Image (cartoon, grey):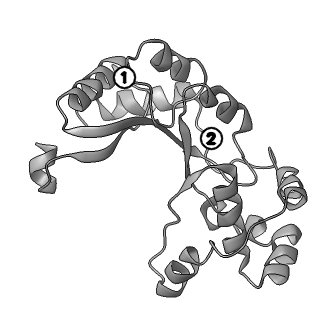
Amino acid sequence: KMLKRLNTEYIDLLLLHQPVGDYLGAYKDMEKAVAMKKVRSIGLSNFESDRLEEVFDNSMIKPSALQVECHPYWQQQEVKEYLKKYGTVIESWYPIGHGDKGLIEEPIFTELANKYHKTNVQIILRWHLQQGNVVFPKTSNLQHLKDNFEIFDFELTDDEMKEIGKLDHTKRFYNLSQAEQDKRYLAWGPED
């Protein structure tokens, strides 16, 4: 049904959105879609801790991507270390902290923006790339869209990356516990 709606023969990447309901069964169905060549890659979104490990322990095809909140304030280094052995990459949502002014205007980003003749957001996006993160910065502003593509003509130094690393664990913008996620799922119902 999805392929027909999208008018395509296959999907490049299909993500299981949340660890609620029969997520292991849903992931197995996604593995079948890969075997049928309807989907090329599969991954997870918003999975953490034991539920993330449960999928890795019970899957034939390891997730190619894990979409989680990731930005300089919440860098996901522990998760990235866990994913490394599987070749799974972080796909960042909220890559610029949901547009948080405090994050974007951090002195380190202003300093580097001046040095490289870039915007603070371009510095953050470049940091993501050098971290190995996949990013999809959302914008409907044409200038911002253009700016988002102009991050490939410079590189941050190791020392600059370490300075940005010091911001880690400062703030998380979206923080629902697993119990809260389960409660939402039960309120919506499995067919939603």
Q: Amino acid at mark 2?
A: Asn
Q: Position of residue 108 (x, y in %)?
A: 87, 68
Front-most of 191 and 138? Answer: 138
Query: Which of pointers 1 and 2 indicates the residue nearer the eye?
Result: 1
Front-most of 155 and 167? Answer: 155
The quarter of the picture where the C terminus appears is top left
Residue that carries the numbered disc 1 in the rendered image? 23
Crowdedness near tag 1: few (<14), some (14–19) or many (≥20) residues, C-alpha within 10 Å: some
- Say left or right for 62 vs 192: right
Q: Is residue 176 visible?
A: yes
Seen at 30% across and 18% down, the residue is 25
Q: Position of residue 171 (x, y in %)?
A: 76, 49
Q: In the figure, residue 96 lies in which quadrant?
A: bottom right
Q: Is residue 1 above or below residue 189?
A: below
Q: Position of residue 35 (x, y in %)?
A: 22, 27
Q: Is residue 61 above or below residue 12?
A: above
Tag 2 secondary structure: loop
Q: In the figure, residue 161 lies in which quadrant?
A: bottom right
Q: Which mark is residue 175?
A: 2
The quarter of the picture where the N terminus appears is top left
